[in-house]
Image (tube, rainbow, N blue to C red):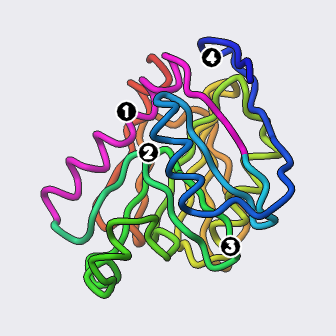
Amino acid sequence: MAVGGGDRAVAIRIDVLHHVTDEELRALSERNPGYQFERTAEGRLVVAPTGGEGGLQSGEVFGQLRDWNRRTQLGLVFDSSTGFNLPNGACRSPDAAWVVRARWDALSNTEREGFPPLCPDAVFEVRSRSDTLTELRAKMREYLDNGARLGVLIDREGNALEVYRSGGDPERHAGPPLLPLDPELPGFVLDSRPIFGD
């Protein structure tokens, strides 16, 4: 399988003859560091390598979320290498995710070691050149349909942020420097300036 380098990489969708199992997904991830493997609800494997710029922006989002959570101690923060088994059968790896502590504590040690069988309460996706808005918007709806309360799509190409909340229509914010994400993340304000390079 050949995949382009950098942010010019193209997401590859591979149709397999069977539903990709957790074990197969984990083995692929271990043998191919630097690539993000996901499984759709239909069992299709999706490979999306992260380029340098995308990784830098995802890291910034993760860092801000982690710093906020350290202050509040309200939950746990996960990076883009964490796969979550959603109720619909998909295994998704958001660029950054947050889970309420009580939900995490309710999982067994075995569930925590594997792909946690839950949808995060808040998810963040950073659009790279290999992503289309249509695909990422569908992913946001999938997260909400599976239990997320908040989804944030960071569109670097369009210099905009889209906020998805359960029970509401998406909100598109054109290049706001600071975006409060209450009430789902109490007191958290996403600073988009380092993400957009302002």
Q: Quadrant of the C terminus?
A: top left
Q: Nearer the viewer, residue 93 or 166?
A: 93
- Callout 3 environment at 10 Å: few (<14), some (14 to 19), or many (20+)? some
In the picture provided, is 155 more to the left or to the right than 106?
right
Q: Is residue 83 above or below residue 62?
A: below
Number of labels in the image equals 4
SS assignment at label 2: loop
Task: Please give the name of the residue rendered at 56% of the width and 39% of the height, measured from the top-left corner.
Answer: 36
x and y percentages locating residue 99 in the rendered image:
37, 69
* Residue topped by disc 4: 7
SS assignment at label 3: loop
The chief SS type of the magenta part is helix
Q: Is residue 163 above or below residue 165?
A: above
Which mark, by number, is residue 59? Answer: 1
C-alpha separation, residue under disc 2 versus residue under disc 4: 17 Å
Q: Nearer the viewer, mark 2 or mark 1?
A: 2
* Residue topped by disc 2: 81
C-alpha separation, residue under disc 2 versus residue under disc 1: 12 Å
C-alpha separation, residue under disc 3 versus residue under disc 2: 18 Å
Q: Is residue 40 magenta?
A: no
* Residue topped by disc 3: 89
C-alpha separation, residue under disc 3 versus residue under disc 4: 28 Å
Could you tell which of marks 4 and 1 lies nearer the N-terminus? Answer: 4
C-alpha separation, residue under disc 4 versus residue under disc 1: 15 Å
SS assignment at label 4: helix
